[in-house]
Image (spheres, rainbow, N blue to C red):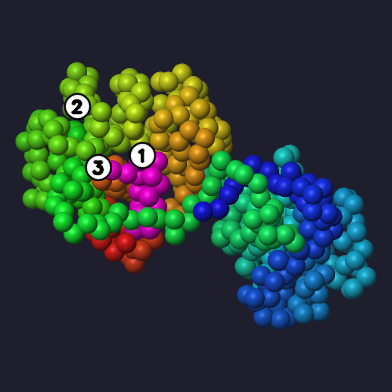
Amino acid sequence: MQKLFDEVASLDKRCYEEFFLNEDILMEHAANGMAEYIRNNFKKKSKVIVVCGSGNNGADGIALARLLHADYDAYVYYAKKPSSKMALLQQKRAISVGVKECSRLQECDVLVDAIVGTGFDGKFSAELTNLIDEMNSIEAFKIACDIPSGYKFLADVTLTMGALKKAMFLDTAKEFVGEVKVLDLGISREVYEKQSNWNLLDLDDLKLPKRVKKDSHKGSYGHLAVVCGEKSGASIMSALSALKFGSGLVTLVGFEKIEIPHSLMYSHEVPINATALALGMGLGREFSTIELEKFLDNKLPLIVDADIFNMDIVLAILKREKVVITPHAKEFVSLLKIVNLADITVEELQKNRFYYAEMFCEKFPYVTLLLKGANVIVAQDSNFYINPHGTQALAKGGSGDVLSGLIGSLLAQGHEPLDAALNGSLAHVRVALNYSGADFSLTPDDLIEGICKL
């Protein structure tokens, strides 16, 4: 697990004021970290073009070209003439050792984007936009210095300085950042970083359910009740996922007679020995409000998904002591409107996912939120986590139902809601990443089958 920050200017300031490191020292370490990455991955004499802007991100790039000079066929291309104090100094140093400039972009082995960094908050000119389009079209390994400029440059890897920035993990940024690696700035991350309420989940953070007690039986591992609605396939997939992930018993609850797998049970009411409840997957309009209220007339840990976020009964659900909600973007927008927090479009949410997640958790601190997306947000009260390991292979109907089953299974086995959401989400993506078939072919059945290989 790694910390995430809104900005790092304050962390740099601590380096200057508390650790007596100046801007030049930090910049040299940043450039040296990038140079080391290139040395470790590309042969000497490879052609490297560093595209530099006018500010300190450009200065990092100029310093990189100087460090690679002689060992590599390194060039600087100035997207804008240096203007910051450090950019002018780095240009002077580069010229003194003979770093070459190029007047146009050309084919190369490595292309480095050092146009603008995290401090840039303006709009790109048409000229810069065209330049980045041209950079994206070049056949080369692409490295972003600190961040991809304007989140328009399609990086294979982003070498970011000092600490991880939250903005890199917006859904809209996932297409551009590639692999993200943190470079130190002459001081360890343990010292450089401060406290943060936001964290980035690593795959190794996954804690699987364990069966350590030998004297146990099916009732020792929880009983999940899954409300079976109009689209029964969704609830069946959730139920099978829960059973595969360790629940001792799983019962589908509904009124219609349907065909179900032999490993599941069926009931017209929530079993009295149930230890958790799952509601919403494929629910449709199968039940009246009175019938739903009857299902909810208990204090069971609860996971809700899908259609429930368009119903007023969600207001009562949000008052429960132990509840996990798992909306996707459109459902979360609907929920925000129902609870009178915001009336926004999906596009607005996607640009400000962190803000609206924080807003929701401030109003509902006891609710565990899992906001689906390319980068999943899991949050409760003032604790926020991002799972960045999702893959486009999961973009298929039923994937979310499997996720609900994983979380529901952990709730039934006695895990706290936040713990269940974190580990359910990590298990979900790890199963997808373990899948050996083509990414377009992954089905919910494959996910359920893959749970046994975790």
The residue nearer to you, when weighing 194 against 35, is 194
- Of label 2 and label 3, which has the lower sequence position? 2
Q: From the viewer's perspective, is 339 left or right of 140?
A: left
How far is the residue under mark 1 from the one under mark 3? 10 Å
Question: Which residue position holds label 2?
Answer: 295
Give the numbered dot on residue 22: none
Identify the residue at horizontal 43%, vertical 53% (top origin): 390
> Which residue type carries mark 2?
Phe
The residue nearer to you, when weighing 138 against 100, is 100
The residue nearer to you, when weighing 341 against 328, is 341
Question: Which residue position holds label 3?
Answer: 412
The residue nearer to you, when weighing 249 against 345, is 249
Identify the residue at horizontal 77%, vertical 76% (top origin): 73
Across the whole image, how many numbered discs are drawn on residues?
3
Q: What is the crowding at mark 3: few (fewer than 14 residues within 10 Å), some, or many (at least 20)?
A: many
Identify the residue at horizontal 25%, vertical 28% (top origin): 299
Question: Which residue position holds label 1?
Answer: 417
> Which residue type carries mark 3?
Ala
Determine whether the residue tagged by mark 2 lies in a helix, strand or loop. Answer: helix
Where residue 205 sits in the image (x, y, percent)? Answer: 44, 55
Vertical arrangement, residue 371 with respect to residue 105, above or below: above
The magenta span reads: 414-432
Identify the residue at horizontal 48%, vertical 56% (top origin): 202
> Which residue type carries mark 1?
Pro
Q: Is residue 430 magenta?
A: yes
